[in-house]
Image (cartoon, rainbow, N blue to C red):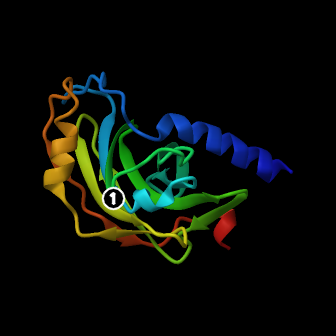
Amino acid sequence: MFRWIAAGAVLLALGGCASGADKDIQFSSESSKALVVIGVVGLDQWQDNSFAMNFRGVNGAGAMDSRVFVVSNGSGWKTMNPVEYFVIEAEPGSYVIAETNTVLGIRQEFTRYCRGTWKFELPRGKAVYIGDFVAAKDGVALPVLPHPEAATAKLAQYPHVAQSLTQAKLQPVAYPASRFCD
């Protein structure tokens, strides 16, 4: 029962994280946060269904901490382009791709990257492009050929961002210790 309540709360939260459409983001090298740009390929095939990628912060000891951000097509009821780019403010530091969350009708599934994931850094006051990922129907999000020009064009739509885009280095790493991946 608790899992279903928690899943419902996640879905409600995803609606606010879905588009990164707040064009009023005020961001410069003096900002206390980092700015994330990510491309998601294949969301046009997810109409009426939801797809989300969850990112978790990792502390110096390699364990997940309380930092989190989500990229999602929201409730899935809107038309998406074959590739969508999202811009999100996040706390700076190290992150891993923790899981994907898919909702297909009334069925909700979580895919955790227990056999390995990707780690990247979000420096304070920097706009970072972490790459493009395929939103596959099996719930897995895999990195694909990056398109920094398209990510830069997306960032240019934000008039109050006075920062150029830098490319993150994705590092393959073991999934941090978790009760979900024992």
The answer to whether residue 180 of the structure is visible from this angle is yes
Relative depth, front residue between 85 and 76: 76
Q: Residue furthest right?
A: 1
Q: Residue under circle 1?
A: 82
Q: Is residue 68 above or below residue 46?
A: above
Q: Is residue 99 above or below residue 27?
A: below
Q: Is residue 31 above or below residue 39?
A: above
Q: Where residue 91 appears, x then y in whole percent?
A: 40, 37
Q: Is residue 144 above or below residue 18?
A: below
Q: Where residue 154 appears, x then y in whole percent?
A: 22, 42
Relative depth, front residue between 92 and 42: 42
Identity of the residue drawn at 45% across and 62% down: 45
Q: Residue furthest bottom?
A: 115
Q: Is residue 113 left or right of residue 133?
A: right
Q: Give the amino acid at mark 1.
A: Pro
Classify the position of the C terminus by image quarter. bottom right
Identity of the residue drawn at 16% across and 55% down: 148
Identity of the residue drawn at 21% across and 49% down: 151
Q: Where residue 30 appears, x then y in whole percent?
A: 22, 25
Which quadrant holds residue 168?
bottom left
Q: Is residue 108 left or right of residue 142?
A: right
- Element marked by disc 1: loop
The answer to whether residue 62 of the structure is visible from this angle is no
Q: Where residue 7 appears, x then y in whole percent?
A: 70, 49
Badge count: 1
Q: Is residue 144 left or right of residue 44?
A: left
Identity of the residue drawn at 24% across and 34% down: 125
Crowding near pointer 1: few (<14 within 10 Å), some, many (20+)?
Answer: few
